[in-house]
Image: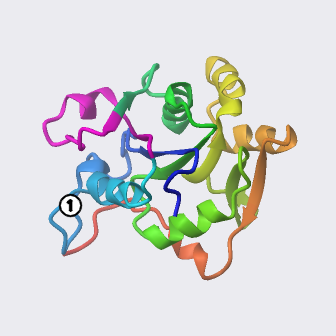
Amino acid sequence: MIEGSPLAVALLAGGRSRRFGSDKALYVPPGFTEPMWRLQLDKLLALGAEEVLVSVGAASLASPRFMPPPEVRMIADRVADRGPLGGLVALLSEIQSPQLLVLGVDMPGVKVASLRRFVAACPEGRGLVPQLDGRWEPLLAIYPRALVELAEERLAAGELSLQGLIDAGVAHGWMDAWPVSAEEAEWFVNLNRPTAP
């Protein structure tokens, strides 16, 4: 539970979905009536955070199919087509909270209980990023707001890798690694193509 804790939450839903073939945020999986963005957002809303944001591209921002509840702020990338780093910079620049939990729109294996477990493992004021098979899992992570200047510098320099940003954040002592167990590995399976009905 994070009710009352100084943690903002955000859905990363601004990707171009090239491999998917259409906007995966708007995809309705078999057996569901809501699109992926809404299913994932509901998981974040269940945490009870005071600041809830959605990172979106310009097309989604204008789409009538992308209408979150009024308490959710839609944040467009400041610079288009800069990948997840562009969305992260925009989000970190907007929050008042010292920490930001992000969740990718294409990670259906993450449950509300998963998020609560992850948040509970994060020290106050710091970042926490899962590490699986020697790589960071940056689309379910907690980023400290203090990382924003470094993220902006890397964005301006065209260094768009979140792996590199996290390496730097860990080196500066702003973020900690969270080793992923075998049980937790299913959280990080991405939805990269439509599933069969």
Side of 73 relative to 159 (left or right): left
Side of 54 relative to 173 (left or right): left
Q: Is residue 188 visible?
A: no
Q: Foreground: 71 or 182?
A: 71
Q: Residue at x 59, y 69 (%)?
A: 117
Question: Amino acid under label 1?
Answer: Val
Q: Magenta segment range?
A: 50-73
From the top left corner, tell me how far across and down residue 184 is, in percent: 59, 75
Q: Residue at x 68, y 25 (%)?
A: 154
The residue labelled by disc 1 is 28
Against 103, is 134 above or below?
Answer: below
Side of 103 relative to 19 (left or right): right
Q: Foreground: 32 or 145?
A: 145
Side of 35 relative to 178 (left or right): left
From the top left corner, tell me how far across and down residue 150 is, in percent: 72, 26
Q: Residue at x 37, y 44 (%)?
A: 18
Q: Residues within 10 Å of mark 1 (few under 14, many from 20)?
A: some
Q: Secondary structure at mark 1?
A: loop
Quarter assignment of residue 131: bottom right
What is the basis of the colouring in this image? Answer: rainbow
- How many numbered markers are drawn? 1
From the top left corner, tell me how far across and down residue 136 is, in percent: 68, 55
Q: Residue at x 18, y 75 (%)?
A: 31
Against 167, is 85 above or below?
Answer: above
Q: Residue furthest front?
A: 4
